[in-house]
Amino acid sequence: MRSVCVNRYVSSLLLLLLIIGTGCSGETDRDRLHSLMDQTEEYEQSQNPFRDSDESDNSPATLWQASLEDMEADYRFWVGMQEQLDRAVTRDNLDTKDQITYDSFLRRVRHNVKEFEYQSHLIPINHEGGFYNRLVGLENRGSFDTVEDYEAYIARLSSVPDYFNDNIERMRRGIEIGYTLPKAIFVEDYTYYINTHIKEKPEESNLFAPFESFSEEVSETDAERLTEEGRIVISDTVMPAYETFVQFLEEEYIPASRETIATVDLPDGDAYYNYLIEYHTTLPMSAEEIHQVGLSEVERIRGEMNQIIEGVGFDRSFQEFLEFLRTDPQFFVDEPDELLKEAMWHSKRMDGKLPELFHIHNLPRRSYGVEPVPDHLAPRYTGGRYSLGGGTRAGHYWVNTYNLPSRTLYTLEALTYHEAVPGHHLQIGLHQEMDDLPRRSGGLTAYTEGWALYAERLGVDAGLYENPYSDFGRLTYEMWRACRLVVDSGMHALGWARQEAIDFMTENTALSHHEIDTEINRYIAVPGQALAYKMGELKILELREQAEVRLGNMFDIRDFHEAVLKNGPVTLPMLEQQVTDFIDGKLSDDSTS
């Protein structure tokens, strides 16, 4: 391990020496920006044997390096990169697309620096998984054509204990300085995630799959030898690593985890939470400002909800209506396939409406499917998510079919528009196919999730949500995101208790009790991220209203959507500039025609 760490540090220094040489005569700011990004990608490739190699012939013999020394070496690299970027590139000297690239890259570099400085690397797990989830699908990564490929795979499996122990070492350091996950998120079945990977027989593990068949290049003798070695390494090395981690959690980490839930209670927690607000929303706002925006949105949405309740003739209280939605059999199914079929129905209905909302050239060619959330994730997973497509893989809208009494039909339509089309699949699939997008580093949740939440409302523009209960479901999803602004800021900065947050969401949303409990644990474990959805949606709605007012009868929703989507994910200030330029250009064209 020591030699690996030294190699990493030497690699960092060599790359930084290359970076220092980027000020050569004749080079532009753009040249230097892309050179720094190239060098960063090379560095990351050297440190992660699986980066961008899912479908390649790469068969590395090691796993990821995750020790404290490795984290410190990474930090030194990113600090050096930030210094060189500040010195070598002036943003004002770049065109619009390269400014987007610069913003994205600088944001990522700074985040890697800040996350280490705020010591988040000492918590490599969260409410629903963590570092050990990176082993999921390991049997599908790399090639399995030759004896050498299999021997490299066995070597990877042999390094699992080191990988687990490195992460345990970081968590122990967190215990020493009081930087742990809150005890509140360790629910009864928390270790279910890890235990699902522990099998009595190695053949029962997904990791054994490569040994079930061999290519013609592997002789029968070698196949028998490799199969036996695979059994032994899975049984005697991999399974004990999982068992050791479960023991560590139950006997050391969970008992030592902190009693408080607020980020501000961590070392330097006030500054960290303020940083997370800006990082996730891309806006310079305080926790109190976020909180007040949330309360205002809750009040507005509640008024629209009351109108629907009145419209369906329900004459009891708001809370009784929510309980009716949570318990009446008409809003639930008995079999997983029934839920999947309902999701498919909503998907196809929206497919037929897309040309009314988007220019044809703004629709992705990659198809998408509807599948259940994988079993090993489902128990503590959200109601649904989008799974990225790539290569020969379609995108997939994952629907959670676990615990069907918690999966409500009246929210399924909004969930479908969010995760599939016109939400994540449309936006991500389109951007995968566009060749002229600005180069970028990392994601922008405020844009991608803001768009997906905005996409839920596009069902109204398309004339869908014909069932008033589904329209109420749309509002309860919007209320859910508004409540996030209130409870995330409340718990992490304003002294709210976990039960206070649960009560607030129970009183204001129609989410099931199971979903609320799962979501609150998510907000506690991943502070600030949940703020991005509503703030992103509000910015898109604000910009749409500006376009409608300024353009009048020239406004075309398809043009507006093209303006929002044209450069892929951008910060909200950059999105505002983008849409303002679109409006100004439209008005200028009209005045000269």
Image (cartoon, rainbow, N blue to C red):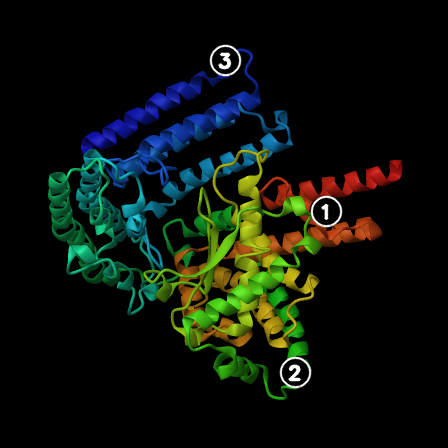
Q: Secondary structure at mark 2?
A: loop
Asked whether disc 1 touches disc 2, contact meaning CB atoms under 8 Å apart, the reply is no
Q: Is residue 122 left or right of residue 26?
A: left
Name the spot of residue 25 as percent of width and height, x first.
53, 11
Name the spot of residue 99 as percent of width and height, x first.
60, 32
Residue that label 2 marks = 312
* Label at residue 559: 1
Residue that label 3 marks = 24
Pointer 3: residues within 10 angstroms few (<14), some, or many (20+)?
Answer: few
Gap in angstroms between the C-alphas marked 1 and 2: 36 Å
Pointer 1: residues within 10 angstroms few (<14), some, or many (20+)?
Answer: some
Please name whichever residue, 228 or 418, is drawn nearer the observer in this view of the structure.
Answer: 228
Furthest toward the bottom, the residue is 315
Residue drawn at the location 38% of the way across and 69% of the way down: 402
Name the spot of residue 167 as percent of width and height, x first.
25, 47
Gap in angstroms between the C-alphas marked 3 and 1: 42 Å
Point out the tag, 3 or 2, that comes first from the N-terminus: 3
Q: Secondary structure at mark 3?
A: loop
Point out the tag, 1 or 2, that comes first from the N-terminus: 2
Residue drawn at the location 65% of the way across and 60% of the way down: 458
Point out the tag, 3 or 1, that comes first from the N-terminus: 3
Name the spot of residue 281 as percent of width and height, x first.
55, 50
Residue drawn at the location 46% of the way across and 62% of the way down: 384
How many numbered circles does the render carry?
A: 3
Pointer 2: residues within 10 angstroms few (<14), some, or many (20+)?
Answer: few
Amino acid under disc 2: Val
Q: Is residue 118 above or below residue 145?
A: below
